[in-house]
């Protein structure tokens, strides 16, 4: 487990820079997620676990939301994404990925996906 490796100090400046220079898709989704607007869930943006930074993270559901732009088609970036997803899943965090275009045109579907995940997670014993 990643015990106490959440938002480690060496990544603090980088996380802040990512928040201050978010992509258009991240800004759109953040407007939907902030202030517990989706199912009363609290999301953090640019939250790190270990050495990996997630676009959005909901601690109560252990859910990471990742948004992928064209850069994620690059092989090295794709391999990094796979390693991050593997690490997060090994630590009990579910990762859901969406293309930026999906945010622009179907943000309602993203919200529905999160709410469905919340419902399934809370139904489990």
Image (tube, rainbow, N blue to C red):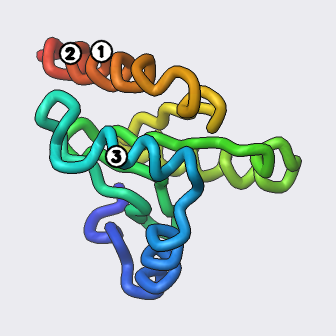
Residue drawn at 32 percent across, 67 percent down: 6
Quadrant of the image occupied by residue 118 = top left
Instruction: Give 62 or 44, whichever is nearer the viewer.
Output: 44
Judge left or right: residue 118 versus residue 78: left
Which residue, given by chain and number where applicable, does mark 2 sit on?
119
Residue neighbourhood size for the residue with mark 2, other residues' Cα within 10 Å, grouped as few (<14), some (14–19), many (≥20): few
Which residue, given by chain and number where applicable, does mark 3 sit on?
31
Q: Residue furthest right?
A: 75
Label disc, if present, on residue 116 of the rendered structure: 1
* Image position, residue 62 (x, y; %): 29, 41
* Residue 78 visible in rendering: no
Mark 1 or 3, which is nearer the eye? Answer: 3
First along the sequence among labels 1 and 3: 3
Above or below: residue 25 compared with residue 103: below
Instruction: Say which quadrant the C terminus sits in.
Output: top left
Above or below: residue 74 compared with residue 106: below
* Image position, residue 93 (x, y; %): 38, 41
Residue drawn at 16 percent across, 42 percent down: 36
Q: Are marks 2 and 1 in contact (CB under 8 Å)?
A: yes
> Distance from label 1 to label 3 (Cα)?
20 Å
> Distance from label 2 to label 1 (Cα)?
5 Å
Instruction: Give 105 or 109, whichever is nearer the viewer.
Output: 105
> Distance from label 2 to label 3 (Cα)?
22 Å
């Amino acid at each position: 487990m990643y015990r106490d490796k959440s938002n480690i100090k060496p990544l603090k400046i980088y996380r802040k820079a990512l928040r201050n220079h978010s992509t258009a898709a991240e800004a759109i989704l953040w407007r939907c997620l902030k202030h517990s607007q989706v199912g009363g869930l609290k999301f953090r943006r640019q939250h790190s676990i270990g050495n990996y930074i997630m676009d959005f993270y909901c601690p109560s559901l252990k859910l990471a939301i990742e948004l992928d732009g064209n850069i994620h088609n690059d092989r090295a970036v794709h391999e990094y994404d796979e390693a991050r997803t593997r690490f997060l899943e090994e630590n009990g965090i579910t990762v859901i990925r969406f293309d930026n275009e999906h945010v622009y045109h179907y943000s309602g579907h993203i919200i529905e996906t999160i709410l469905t995940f919340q419902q399934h997670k809370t139904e489990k014993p």
